[in-house]
Amino acid sequence: MDQTPPRFSKPVNAEPSRGASTLTRQWAALQDAGSAIATLANLAPEEPSQKTRQFPVLIKDVDGWRLELAKNQVADMTAMMQPGLAALLAVNARGQDATAAAITLWREYHAAREAVLALLPEAGAMGPRRTA
């Protein structure tokens, strides 16, 4: 396994004018980190749902508190995953078994991901898509 953890971008609030692209990059990095953690946990590869794959596109059409909460949650997930994955890779590089720790981090990641995905309105509840 590659011993280099994925690069996480700056926190969402660091570049307000580029919030959407930052969120997209962070989300992609989180999905990559999740896959790496699943591998370290000896879990079968997960096929991401359409909702998971399209999250950055879908959440940008949500205004108000849901969008802000989603940005904050993604930033929090990034803060959790970066050192967690780095620690797992370090343990693995020393030849030690990181399975139990990886499973624990996977569960935290999975719960956080489901919570942020729950911020998306049900299909059809958002009305017509905005064009910018």
Image (cartoon, rainbow, N blue to C red):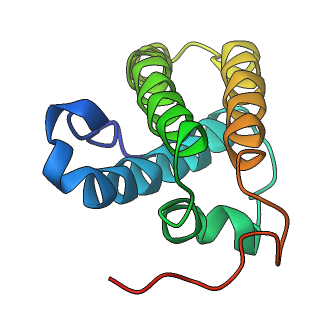
Q: Can I make out residue 48 in this image?
A: no
Q: Can I make out residue 27 in this image?
A: yes
51 left or right, relative to 36: right
Q: Nearer the viewer, residue 78 or 102?
A: 78
* Residue 110 in which image quadrant: top right
48 left or right, relative to 69: right
* Residue 11 in which image quadrant: top left
Vertical arrangement, residue 85 with respect to residue 59, above or below: above
- Residue at image point 44% right, 57% down: 28
- Residue at image point 52% right, 43% down: 64
- Picture coordinates of residue 65, whole percent (x, y): 56, 36
Q: Nearer the viewer, residue 68 or 41?
A: 68
- Picture coordinates of residue 115, whole percent (x, y): 75, 35
- Residue at image point 59% right, 71% down: 54
Q: What is the total number of numbered labels drawn onto the structure image?
A: 0
Q: Nearer the viewer, residue 129 or 93?
A: 129
Quarter of the rendering occupied by the C terminus: bottom left
Vertical arrangement, residue 29 with respect to residue 4, above or below: below
* Residue 58 in which image quadrant: bottom right
- Picture coordinates of residue 75, whole percent (x, y): 41, 30
